[in-house]
Amino acid sequence: MSRIAYVNGRYLPHRQAAIHVEDRGLQFADSVYEVCEVKDGRLVDEDRHMARLARSLSELRIASPRKPAALGTILREVIRRNRVANGIVYLQVTRGVAPRGHAFPTPAVPPGLVVTARSIDPAEGAARARAGIAVVTTPDNRWDRVDIKTVGLLPNVLAKQKAHESGAFEAWFVDENGFVTEGSSTNAWILTSDGILVTRPAEHGILRGITRGVVIEAAEAEGIAVEERPFSLSEALAAKEAFITASSTIVLPIVTVDGHRIGDGKAGPIATRLRELYHRHAQYGPCRATAVA
Ligand code: PMP
């Protein structure tokens, strides 16, 4: 079965799905995106993702291509056409197509919209969560607006490549003061020796992860104290547990950072518990095959 993408109003097999050579997403990474989890055929945390998308668009003054409800319809249709029961759906909105020039096009052009989806075997994530993952660190050399979810991800690409070349699953960015900011595509967490969960505040230095927000809720509902404050790499190395969160991975316990064992070197019980609890706190949308405008 060939995969189907939505591109600017049409559902097309990937080999026919194309964007214009002068799309500003291609020319300047002048575009924003979202990745949502699909679980048991249902879109997870749609409202939260749509709210973050609206914020990213407004920070960059890119027009919204559709109302949130219509975007949701397109997301569900791409999920359906690709028969994704478990996996992810990806949406990108670009500022549109215009002759190459750095400033915004005048008059404004319509924004571009691309949606794809792919299946991920849940057994893969489950096995990774049982084993725990390795993380390496790398200097955070990104711009200071990583709270906007843009496709300008070259530092993240290089960081993830470094992780993979080191046999690790993720790279943690460390700022110039020795504090961990976040992973290349995940948020970063530790559990201190006195049982407090710590994650960096969602200011401009990290992406305000949807999973991060839900995990805070889940932890608080379990009576686990959560502190939103920066933590240093040395604090992480001395932590009882560490883990990462993202829509594509949910919660994954960390067993080593830069080759140093975290805790007892096994997947931590609190991280494992939060992974189990996650979907009780997430929001599920309907799974419907709908006609698409
Ligand atoms: N930080 C970065 C840099 C990311 O790319 C992601 C994944 N999109 C996250 C954090 C986690 O965000 P979310 O929980 O919304 O997937």
Image (cartoon, rainbow, N blue to C red):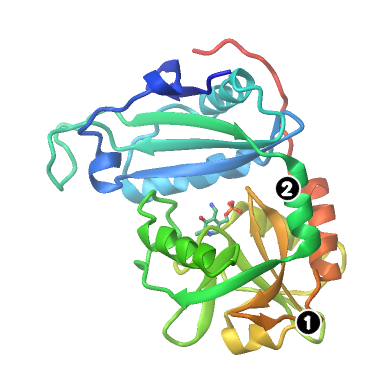
The correct choice, above or below, for 199 with respect to 281 in the image is below
Circle number at residue 263: 1
Which residue is nearer to you in this view: 266 or 147? Answer: 266
Residue at the disc numbered 2: 124
Which quarter of the figure is the N terminus placed in?
Answer: top right
Image coords of residue 251 (percent x, y): 72, 58
Considering the numbered disc 1 on the image, is that residue within a helix, a strand or a loop? loop
First in residue order: circle 2 vs circle 1: 2
Q: Position of residue 170 (x, y in %)?
A: 57, 64
Name the side, left or right, on which 173 lies relative to 118. Answer: left
**Image quadrant where residue 180 sits:** bottom right
Going by the image, does 228 lie left or right of 197?
A: left
Q: Which residue type does callout 1 highlight? A: Gly
- Vertically, is 156 above or below 17? below
Residue extending furthest top?
291
Residue 195 seen in the current view = yes
The reply, left or right, for residue 225 in relation to residue 167 is right
Which amino acid type is marked by label 2? Glu
Towards the viewer: 113 or 281: 113
Mark 2 surroundings within 10 Å by alpha-carbon count, few (fewer than 14), some (14 through 19), many (20 or more): few
User: Is ligand 1 less than 8 Å from the beta carbon at label 1?
Assistant: no
Q: Quadrant of ligand 1?
A: bottom right
